[in-house]
Image: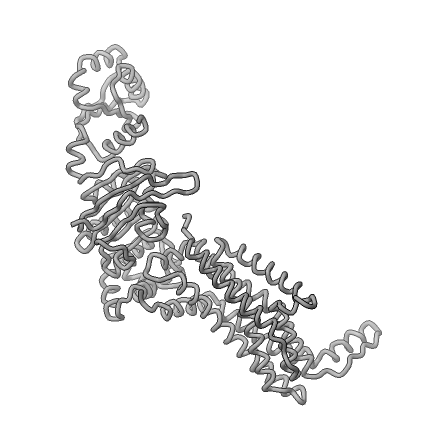
Amino acid sequence: MAMIEINSITKHYRTIEALKGVSLCVQEGTIFGFLGPNGAGKTTLIRILAHLIEPTSGSFSIDGKDLKQHIGYLAQQPAFYPWMTARELLRFSGKLYGLTSLETEKRIHELLSLCGIQAAADRRVGTYSGGMIQRLGIAQAILHKPKVVLLDEPASALDPIGRKEILTLISRLHEETTVFMSSHILEDIQRVCDEVAIIADGSIVLQQDMDTLLRSHAQPLISLEFDHPSDALLCQTLLSKLSIEVAREAHNRIVIAETEYQNRYSQIMNTLNDHDLRLRSLNKQNATLEDVFMHHIKERSHA
Amino acid sequence: MHNNIGILLWKEMTEGLRSYRILIWVMVCLFFGILSPLSAYYMPDILAMIGSTQNIALTLSEVTYRDAVDQYVKNFTQIGSIIMIFLAMGSVAGEKADGSLQFLMVRPISFHVILFAKIIALMAMVVLGIGIAALVCALYTQYLFPGFPLTLFIQSNLILLLYLLVIGVMTTSLSAMVSRPVTAGLASLGLWLVFSMLGSLGGAGWYSFTRLASEIIQVVEGFPISLKPFSSAILVILGSIGGGLCVLSRWEPSH
């Protein structure tokens, strides 16, 4: 069953066309990843869904309606009242959504525990770290059991430990709601999302479930690791001259498509030998969401 | 849509208390309430003391409760107005600037309720402050000056309340129209000065709400009052709220 339906939404800011007829459909109970480079239109679409801004044209519905009651929202840079405690903030939020005192207190108890901020529940929000603010942000977004939770870059400002904790928390959310999260961190999306859409320059490039996407769009890759970064750089230049698409993965590692490697094996090896480039290792690796993303973004920029 | 005005009022009042806004206002009102009659009563002694150090004889006509009330009105309509602008200028613009207004915007609450809750909380703060100031001022003035018309003084405080409400509502509404508290403060200060200059003129000047200050004195003296500045006050309040709601309902966060 479709939980979020977005129909041809556009958004213009004077001369800028931030969204160009975006249409999407998100199924109930999924964790939907909304990927795109900075400035692609991710935050604009999420703000439209959260009723923070009006679309220039087009429409959307959440569970067939357009009600704020059905939505939980966490902003990219969440800002709460610093003079409130977390418990007071959640209580305030519950009352604004029309929950009874009993329901609110029960829910606050559950969520403080789920989000791991029980110990700091009676501390003022102004004293919270970035990770704690983010966890409180998730708690306030799901307090009223919304049908959809909109998370705008929920982990992008956090350190690796904070990121891991938030992603674990998000992965638990699909048991009670549909999650629509944006990110430019591909690893995060790949880790928790069931379905993904890529947006570039205000338009949707593709929408697919994660497994199919990785299977159908991505090709296995061969990673060539050298002793020195200069060798990797030289190899990249030489293979590019042979019209082989090469990506630099690390300072001393490059990757090429497995099919390319197999079809032009002798040519590649001869080039390496001719320039005395010595490989440290050669590995086959599975495609990642990053490969798919880069492929589509490049394709779009060429178009 | 739920009836959220109660919970928003709780938020506004708690914020006012924890940010010391209410405390500052009450202290200012208490100070004006005590200072006005005392400064009027001791003014001849103060002037005589200053004169004796300079070898000048300064004489002042006999001070009465009128001087105390005059001082009280001046304190509130001048310094009090500036403090009111300072306290109200960040009420909406501050939440826009720090991003916390978005917390309310994504919830099932209308802009009307958000703005009205802020105005009602401000009214409560002004009533509390003026109530305390009037009580203290009345006690001191009655003790120090004979013939003080207590009932008329209480009535005159209702006009003072209206004067400060116009400033407060105008500043809060301007705060809803702009993105930075300082812009709201400067705009409100500018408008107040324009109305004050207009009020100092004859004819059309009677339609400036700042003329309410002279109506306060009229009431204490038991003279009839003009309704012209009252009509201006009501128009400024309604116009400000209308403008504030109109702009706020179209506001979109930029960050």
Residue A238 drawn above or below residue A54: above
Q: Quadrant of residue B78?
A: bottom right
- The furthest residue to the bottom: B147
Q: Is residue B196 left or right of residue A165?
A: right
Nearer the observer, A60 or A222? A60
- The furthest residue to the top: A274
Residue A190 image position (x, y, % from top left): 22, 40
Q: Quadrant of residue A94?
A: bottom left
Residue B201 image position (x, y, % from top left): 69, 66
Q: How many marks?
A: 0
Residue A21 shows up from this direction = yes
Residue A122 shows up from this direction = no
| Residue at 72% from the left image edge and 78% from the top image edge | B43
| Residue at 16% from the left image edge and 17% from the top image edge | A263
Residue A153 drawn above or below residue B236: above
Residue A277 image position (x, y, % from top left): 26, 16
Quadrant position of the N terminus of chain B in the picture: bottom left
Q: Which color mode does the image show?
A: one colour
Residue A50 image position (x, y, % from top left): 31, 52
| Residue at 40% from the left image edge and 69% from the top image edge | B9
Q: Is residue A219 left or right of residue B47?
A: left
Residue B142 drawn above or below residue B75: below
Residue A277 drawn above or below residue A181: above
Q: Quadrant of residue A215?
A: top left
| Residue at 18% from the left image edge and 15% from the top image edge | A264
Q: Is residue B136 left or right of residue A2?
A: right
- The furthest residue to the front: B203
